[in-house]
Image (cartoon, grey):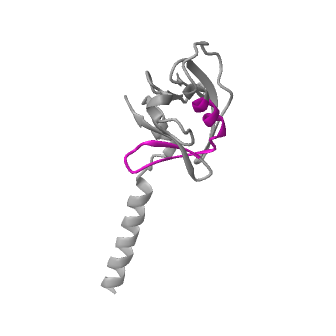
Amino acid sequence: MQKNAFILLSMVLVLMASCGTTKSTGSEKLYGPVWELEYISGPRIAFEGLFPDKRPQISFNRDTGQVEGNAGCNGYSAVYTLNGDRISFGEPGPATMMYCGGGEKQFLNMMLKVNGYSFDAEGKLELLVGEILMLRFKKID
């Protein structure tokens, strides 16, 4: 009888402890840091050739529902929508119009295709199309 009571008490304590812990949703990791691009899928040009002077960056603003950053040359902003591990980006808004090669256009076009996100084991942000990695960012803040 005491053994059953001990098992029941143990189970109740484990259940209470697991209910008391809070898990951070994946989306919480998006906010705060500036993310810098370190990989883009698709182009036949070397990464350094696409972004010779500056790598694209992105930061997420929870309050405004916008992302802001630099596309490798010009600044940009766009709305984003989150739903679980799904993400989508709107058309990039006002940007300066300097031409700095084709990398910026490829980056912004890829952002429009993205429909999901995840974080790898190192905490890097992965933007996906389906389950295929399209863009990977590292924290720089």
Can I make out residue 116 in this image? Answer: yes
In percent of width and height, residue 126 lies at 50, 44
Is residue 11 rendered to the left or right of residue 74? Answer: left
In percent of width and height, residue 10 lies at 34, 72
Quick check: is 127 in the magenta stretch? yes
Q: Residue at x 43, y 21 (%)?
A: 53
How many numbered discs? Answer: 0
In front: 9, or 78? Answer: 78
Location of the N terminus (image quadrant): bottom left
In front: 122, or 15? Answer: 122
Q: Residue at x 64, y 44 (%)?
A: 115
Is residue 110 rendered to the left or right of residue 47? Answer: right
In percent of width and height, residue 141 lies at 37, 28
In percent of width and height, residue 128 lies at 57, 46
Name, please, the residue furthest toward the right.
91
Q: Residue at x 66, y 35 (%)?
A: 112
The segment highlighted magenta reads: 106-128
Residue 121 vertical position relative to residue 54 in the rendered view, above or below: below
Can I make out residue 63 in this image? Answer: no
Residue 59 vertical position relative to residue 124 in the rendered view, above or below: above
Q: Residue at x 39, y 51 (%)?
A: 121
Quick check: is 83 in the magenta stretch? no
In front: 16, or 66? Answer: 66
In front: 29, or 9? Answer: 29
Quarter of the rendering containing residue 3: bottom left
Quarter of the rendering containing residue 16: bottom left
